[in-house]
């Protein structure tokens, strides 16, 4: 019975909601029939027809009122009234398209940017890995307390494991299975040579990640039982399609990796590209590591090396806490074997980037990013509040009328909140479009080629966007709603001057909003200004070398097993061919390009009095033509001879900074430097160059001559189009040896990439800050206008007793100055803190750079003065006599 | 006495439904007819005004107790007639016995000295 009634009411509610037009019509007919019947009754009782109808209407108590009561009684009445409110709101918003568009656009930008920041951080730090049952997958890290770090070698992150350590942790019963991986570039030769993103993995890698195979299988335990085991390889689905055209006979085929034959045993399913940020296309057993490096690198048997990322699948009933406890016990056991070592193992939910440092040192930049994100939303909300408040004043009369004819305050507040909610929902929906566009943006800007970071929104991101929307509704919706309904009916109906006697809360709220906007805009503008100065400086600074027309080529000779002699002949042939190309000014070899990697080293220098001094400098290994190629100069002495074998004593070249810091007032030529156990003589002093950062145009640099070309890059400067050269060199290398692959890079592109983040921040913060400033000035103008109206009477008295026009204008301007200056002050302080944290992006511009701060303060002050002066001037136009007469 | 204006007491809230069900149990009727029939049945004690009658009718219709139809009234005017459904009849029985129980109990309570 109760159930049937509920069903019947639900059906009725739907009918009432969706067939409202017809139902309203029926109700209207029914009530009119009632009145007619009542009138007919009265006529029968002897009343004249005209009177009867009137009496019947009166007795019915007003048809409209009855209708309203029926509507309230009907099933789904609240739903229906909600629908009516929504309809009403939509009509209202359509009537003021300018306001609606401004609010929705502001919210969309605010919510969109904030959500984009959230999505990026979430995708990198917390999103489950792209594998089956990812919620059971964990990463295992082992951080070393400071004491044990000294002798430890690190390749990647200090929390990574060595292979032996992994084998110990893998024994934990909390793990159903576990594995390690390490990314490595592999030279693949199967007809044509190419470089592939490979991974060295332990045997259980595929089983742990529950990867299935399109063809063949993963590695068997025998294949990785001992170092140098079976040369087997698994290909990704993508590599199989691209390189083998999806040929199913690929399993069993032999491919050469780094020149060593491997047998293909399997092809993974389509969706799997490894679990590192960079997509992998080929997997080999970790036990083949030494062989793949041609015996040069024995990482897999080194015990004190951090280089492997461990991933494990929790056993069916195991918890993260159990796993952590067990890992700690194993860590202690390992510590017992090495004196003075203290390991802090941690087992964390699987994600792309989740090593302990992210939780520790990384927390600060993260908090910074989130803070920026929330500032953006708060600014958007403040902007919307000021828009809504401005409209609230305009709607004061409308609301007063509706209150007067009997609408309840609760109903009005509900309607205003519905309006805010709808605006926020529209804003959030548009903001979501930002988030959906994010994958394309990221793909366009990504510094990592082949990045598989999934930044498409999932249910958590969508929930987040709407949560931010809801929070925004509360932030900007409630205050104006309360303000708008606390209307004093009597004065609202009078004219504007009567507004002066209203409670002052609205103007207080507006002053606070203006202060917040000012703070936000000051902060954003200062940060934006600093970043802009930073990037401008980075671009404008003369790095001391040429960037345009400079191209670098890196080769895989080392990976495919070339020895120094063989490499030397290949390099010589390529260098000669490049040099003979028309337009090429100079060619050289170098260990690295400036700015793109940083290596520094400590060494001893010989002083005049015979003692030695410890020095530290960036160092580069370059051939003699490097300086000419980069358009640098040898200030004193000579450059290196052409590639030739050197005795244990090398000639070295120092930068001017290094020379003057080491031998002040002396000639550096002929001085000696102790480097890796031997003394070397300074033969030249090079012009200054920015090697480690564009922030420093002069820094100590030590240049060593190239002894072994293996692993070096070829760098060339050309006056013709670099594109042709970049395409030709790989061809020439292939002609020498089909297994040789060459990657070409335009130096300018790589520098631009390094500058991009700073430029993006500068533009984003600058635009938002300017927007906030614009709204703050409009807001303050409103506050002052309001105040002039409010204090009209007082101002008239002041003028009457002798105050000059200038006095009253100043008086009013001071009123506006308070929220502005407090806001700007707070904003600048926040900027100081933020800038300290963002120091790394400022390219040597001080976080307290006076020019940026003064310029922004000047902008803020002039905007503030203009925004308060214009409305304050109206105070001077008050006619005391007329005003006082009116008010009396 | 009118229910809407004086709102005698919360006790009488359910009475309107019961009276409407009773009125319709005697035969299909339109709004004004129901109102008049209740007046007759209660010897003029309850005069149901449209402001309470129609909300009640629509609520009961949504609950599935009444079924409407349009018909010709005695004066050849179109009017919306209400008919008790099976569910409505059952509801009437339940409410009637409930009312009897309460009435007996209250009467007994008032008689105690």
Image (cartoon, grey):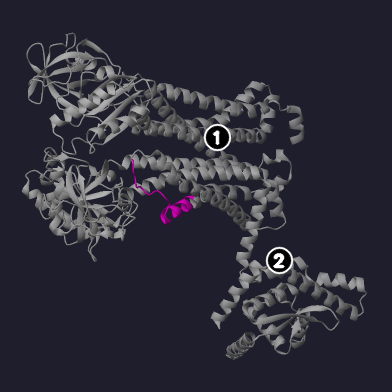
> Dividing the picture into quarters, in which one does residue A689 lie?
top left
Residue A716, visible in the rendered structure:
yes
Quadrant for the N terminus of chain A in the image: bottom right
The residue at which mark 2 appears reads as A21
Residue at horizontal 19 percent and vertical 32 percent from the top: A711
Q: Where is residue B97 in the image (x, y as percent from the top left)?
A: 60, 90
Q: Which of A562 and A364 is in front in this view?
A: A562
On residue A475, which mark appears? none
Answer left or right for A498 relative to A688: right
Number of marks drawn:
2
Residue A803 visible in rendering: no
| The residue stretch that appears in magenta | A449-468
Where A653 falls versus A35 (above or below)? Answer: above
Both marks 2 and 1 on one chain: yes
In percent of width and height, residue A814 lies at: 57, 28
SS of the residue under disc 2: helix
Residue receiving disc 1: A776
Real-space CA distance between mark 2 and mark 1, rounded to the nearest whole angstrom = 46 Å
Image x and y of residue A724, in percent: 36, 28
Q: Which of A714 and A762 is in front in this view?
A: A714
Q: Which of A81 and A804 is in front in this view?
A: A81
Earlier sequence position, callout 2 versus callout 1: 2
Q: Is residue A454 magenta?
A: yes
Q: Where is residue A299 in the image (x, y as percent from the top left)?
A: 13, 43
Q: Do the residues labelled 2 and 1 touch (CB within 8 Å)?
A: no
Give me the chain letter of mark 1. Answer: A
For label 1, the SS is helix
Which class describes the residues within 10 Å of circle 2: few (<14), some (14-19), or many (20+)? few
């Amino acid at each position: 019975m109760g159930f049937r009634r509920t069903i019947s009411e639900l059906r009725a509610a739907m009918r009432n909601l969706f067939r409202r037009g017809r139902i309203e019509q029926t109700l209207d007919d029914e009530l009119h029939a009632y009145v007619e019947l009542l009138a007919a009754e009265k006529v029968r009782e002897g009343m004249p027809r005209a009177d009867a109808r009137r009496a019947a209407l009166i007795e019915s108590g007003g048809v409209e009122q009855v209708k309203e009561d029926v509507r309230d009684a009907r099933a789904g009445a609240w739903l229906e009234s909600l629908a009516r409110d929504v309809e009403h709101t939509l009509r209202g918003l359509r009537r003021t398209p300018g306001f609606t568009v401004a609010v929705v656009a502001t919210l969309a930008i605010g919510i969109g940017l904030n959500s984009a920041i959230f999505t990026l951080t979430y995708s990198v730090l917390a999103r489950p890995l792209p594998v089956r049952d990812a919620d059971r997958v964990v990463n295992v890290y082992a951080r070393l307390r400071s004491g044990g770090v000294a002798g430890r070698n690190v390749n990647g992150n200090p929390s990574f494991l060595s292979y032996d350590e992994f084998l110990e942790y893998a024994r934990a019963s909390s793990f159903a299975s576990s594995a390690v991986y390490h990314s490595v570039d592999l030279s693949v030769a199967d007809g044509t040579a190419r470089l592939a993103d490979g991974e060295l993995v332990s045997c259980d890698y595929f089983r742990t990640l529950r990867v299935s195979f399109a063809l063949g299988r993963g590695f068997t335990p025998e294949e990785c039982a001992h170092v140098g085991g079976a040369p087997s390889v698994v290909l990704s689905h993508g590599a199989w399609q691209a390189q083998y055209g999806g040929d199913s006979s690929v399993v069993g085929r032999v491919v050469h990796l780094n020149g060593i034959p491997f047998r293909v045993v399997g092809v993974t399913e389509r969706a799997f590209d490894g679990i590192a940020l960079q997509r992998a296309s080929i997997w080999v057993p970790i036990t083949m590591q030494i062989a793949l490096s041609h015996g040069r690198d024995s990482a897999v048997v080194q015990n004190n090396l951090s280089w492997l990322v461990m991933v494990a699948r929790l056993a069916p009933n195991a918890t993260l806490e159990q796993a952590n406890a067990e890992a700690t016990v194993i860590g202690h056991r390992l510590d017992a074997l090495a004196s003075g070592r203290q390991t802090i193992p941690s087992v964390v939910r699987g994600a792309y980037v989740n090593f302990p440092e992210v939780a520790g040192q990384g927390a600060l930049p993260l908090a910074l990013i989130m803070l920026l994100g929330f500032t953006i939303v708060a600014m958007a909300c403040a902007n919307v509040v000021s828009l809504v408040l401005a409209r609230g004043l305009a709607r004061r009369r409308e609301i007063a009328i509706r209150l007067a004819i009997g609408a309840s305050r609760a109903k009005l507040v509900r309607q205003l909140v519905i309006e805010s909610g709808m605006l926020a929902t529209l804003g959030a929906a548009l903001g979501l479009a930002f988030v959906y566009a994010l994958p394309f943006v990221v793909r366009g800007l990504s510094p990592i080629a082949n990045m598989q970071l999934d930044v498409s929104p999932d249910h958590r991101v969508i929930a987040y966007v709407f949560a931010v929307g809801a929070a925004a509704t509360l932030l900007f919706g409630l205050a104006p709603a309360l303000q708008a309904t606390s209307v004093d009916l009597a004065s609202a109906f009078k004219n504007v001057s009567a507004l002066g006697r209203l409670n002052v809360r609205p103007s207080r709220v507006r002053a606070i909003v203006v202060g917040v906007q000012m703070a936000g805009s000051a902060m954003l503008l200062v940060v934006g200004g600093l970043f802009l100065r930073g990037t401008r400086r980075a671009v404008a600074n003369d790095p001391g070398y040429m960037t345009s027309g400079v191209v670098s080529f890196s080769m895989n000779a080392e990976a495919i097993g070339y020895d120094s002699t063989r490499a030397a002949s290949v390099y010589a042939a390529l260098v000669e061919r490049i040099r003979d190309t028309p337009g090429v000014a100079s060619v050289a070899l170098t260990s690295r390009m400036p700015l793109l990697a940083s290596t520094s080293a400590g060494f001893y220098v010989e002083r005049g009095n015979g003692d030695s001094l410890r020095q530290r400098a960036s160092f580069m290994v370059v051939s003699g033509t490097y300086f000419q190629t980069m358009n640098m100069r040898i200030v004193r002495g000579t450059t290196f001879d052409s590639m030739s074998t050197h005795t244990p004593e090398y000639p070295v070249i120092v930068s001017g900074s290094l020379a003057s810091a080491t031998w002040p007032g002396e000639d550096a030529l002929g001085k000696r430097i102790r480097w890796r156990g031997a003394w070397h003589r300074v033969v030249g002093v090079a012009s200054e160059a920015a090697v480690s950062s564009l922030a420093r145009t002069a820094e100590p640099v030590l240049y060593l001559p190239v002894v072994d070309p293996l692993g070096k890059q070829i760098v060339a400067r050309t006056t013709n189009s670099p594109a042709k050269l970049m395409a030709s060199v790989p061809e020439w290398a292939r002609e020498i040896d089909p297994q040789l692959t060459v990657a070409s890079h335009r130096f300018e592109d790589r520098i631009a990439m390094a500058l991009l983040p700073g430029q993006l921040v500068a533009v984003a913060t600058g635009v938002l800050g300017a927007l906030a400033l614009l709204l703050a000035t409009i807001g303050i103008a409103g506050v002052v206008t309001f105040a002039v109206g409010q204090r009209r009477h007082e101002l008239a008295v002041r003028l009457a007793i002798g105050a000059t026009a200038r006095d009253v204008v100043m008086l009013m301007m001071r009123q506006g100055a308070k929220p502005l200056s407090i806001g700007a002050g707070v904003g600048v302080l926040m900027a100081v803190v933020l800038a300290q944290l963002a120091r790394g992006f400022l390219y040597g511009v001080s976080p307290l750079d006076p020019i940026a701060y003064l310029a922004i303060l000047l902008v803020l002050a002039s905007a503030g003065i203009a925004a308060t002066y214009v409305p304050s001037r109206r105070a001077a136009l008050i006619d005391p006599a007329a005003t006082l007469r009116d008010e009396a | 006495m009118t229910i809407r204006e004086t709102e005698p007491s919360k006790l009488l809230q359910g009475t309107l439904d019961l009276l409407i069900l009773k009125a319709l149990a005697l035969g299909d009727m339109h709004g004004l007819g129901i109102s008049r029939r209740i007046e007759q049945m209660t010897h003029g004690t309850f005069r149901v005004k449209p402001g309470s009658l129609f909300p009640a009718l629509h609520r009961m219709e949504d609950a599935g107790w009444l079924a409407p139809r349009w018909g010709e009234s005695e004066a050849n005017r179109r009017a919306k007639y209400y008919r008790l459904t099976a569910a409505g009849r059952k509801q009437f029985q339940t409410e009637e016995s409930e009312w009897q129980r309460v009435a007996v109990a209250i009467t007994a309570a008032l008689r105690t000295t």
